[in-house]
Image (spheres, helix red, strand yellow):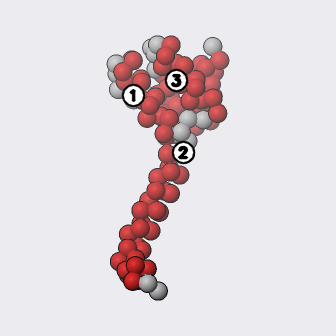
């Protein structure tokens, strides 16, 4: 083996693997679906949002779910548009993720 390969194997292999594992874990996390509380937030702020924010929510739901990556943009739009920090009220506590998603889909159809 060359000196460069030996140096990499001795000193850089584990830190490089740590970065790769972290990147893979992060990419899996941001593409996963949001939780029921987030769907409840989008449902409760739907009536107060302007048409631009509503169309952004519609666009994010076009594939049937909203990912964490998309929810970052939507949360920023809601805070700027509705001028409140969107928190889930007590209504979100009892529903499942499918029920929360169904409520949002019903609002999208209106």
To which residue does mark 2 refer? 31
Location of residue 66 with respect to 55 vertically, above or below: below
Decide: marks 2, 3 in contact (CB < 8 A)?
no
Other-residue count near label 2 (Cα within 10 Å), few / some / many at <14 / 14–19 / ≥20: few
Q: Earlier in the sequence, mark 1 or mark 2?
A: 2
Q: Earlier in the sequence, mark 3 or mark 1?
A: 3
Most extreme residue toward the bottom is: 1
Q: CA distance from mark 1 to mark 2?
A: 18 Å
Q: Is residue 77 left or right of residue 51?
A: left
Q: Is residue 106 left or right of residue 74?
A: right
Q: Where is residue 56? Give x, y as percent.
A: 52, 23
Q: Where is residue 44? Give x, y as percent.
A: 48, 22
Q: SS of the residue at dot 3?
A: helix
Front-lying residue, 55 or 4: 4
Front-lying residue, 85 or 76: 76
Other-residue count near label 1 (Cα within 10 Å), few / some / many at <14 / 14–19 / ≥20: few
Q: SS of the residue at dot 1?
A: helix
Decide: marks 3, 1 in contact (CB < 8 A)?
no
Residue 4, labelled with which disc?
Answer: none
Most extreme residue toward the front is: 2
Residue 76, labelled with which disc?
Answer: 1
To which residue does mark 3 refer? 56
């Amino acid at each position: 083996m060359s000196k460069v390969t030996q140096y990499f194997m001795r000193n850089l292999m584990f830190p490089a693997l740590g970065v790769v594992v972290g990147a893979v874990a992060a990419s899996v996390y941001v593409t996963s679906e949001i939780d029921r509380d987030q769907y409840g937030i989008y449902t409760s702020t739907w009536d107060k949002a302007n048409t631009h924010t509503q169309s952004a929510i519609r666009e994010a739901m076009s594939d049937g779910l909203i990912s964490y990556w998309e929810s970052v943009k939507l949360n920023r739009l809601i805070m700027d548009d509705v001028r409140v920090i969107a928190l889930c009220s007590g209504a979100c506590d009892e529903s499942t993720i499918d029920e929360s998603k169904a409520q949002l889909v019903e609002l999208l159809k209106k």
